[in-house]
Amino acid sequence: MNELYEFIKKCGTYYLATSENGKPKNRPFGTINIFENKLYIQTGKKKAVSHQIQSNPNVELCCFDASTGRWLRLAGELVRDDRREAKADMLSHYPELANMYSADDDNTEVLYFKKGTGTIYSFSAEPKVIKL
């Protein structure tokens, strides 16, 4: 899990794919965190992405490291964690979000990968598979 976290963190931006009415939806994200040995992302409950995840928790995240020519695809199931501690920990790593989110508001949402498979690809090596 730490290798997946470090890869995503280095990329800075990843793209999260969900589905809505059987159609793919994809958007850039930047928050990633490890809390209580689980890999977390963050969004707002008012956003369409939150509703899509609650309707179908199966997602895929993808990011590309241009410096190495490697990319990651992480497919898995997300679970909402409504605990204040999980929200506060995430937001402590992203102070720039303080003007939009708070651990005590009704909008901040953190979700962790309940299960998942991360695969790191390269044009010059065999894919590396990491199970969560």
Image (cartoon, helix red, strand yellow):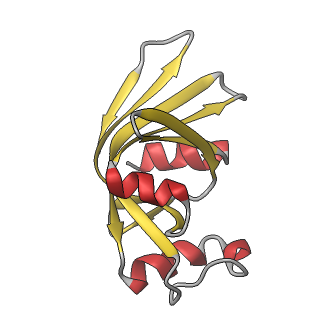
Q: Is residue 93 above or below residue 126?
A: below
In the image shown, does 82 or 33 lie closer to the viewer?
Answer: 82
Q: Name which quarter of the figure residue 74 lies in.
A: top left
Q: Quadrant of the C terminus?
A: top left
Image coordinates of residue 111 in percent, x first then y, are 40, 62
* Furthest residue toward bottom: 104
Q: Relative to 47, is 114 on the left or the right?
A: left
Q: Is residue 54 left or right of residue 65?
A: left
- Rendered location of residue 115, percent (x, y): 26, 47
In this view, 72 is above or below 86: above
Identified at 41% across, 39% down, the residue is: 21
Q: Residue at x 58, y 84 (%)?
A: 102
| Residue 7, position as x, y percentages in the image | 55, 41
Residue at the far front in the pictured view: 21
User: Position of 118 compared to 6: left or right?
Assistant: left
Question: Measuring 65% from the left and 32% from the top, which residue is drawn there?
Answer: 65
Q: How many marks?
A: 0
| Residue 20 x, y percent position in the rendering | 44, 42
Say if 85 sits above or below 19 in the image: below
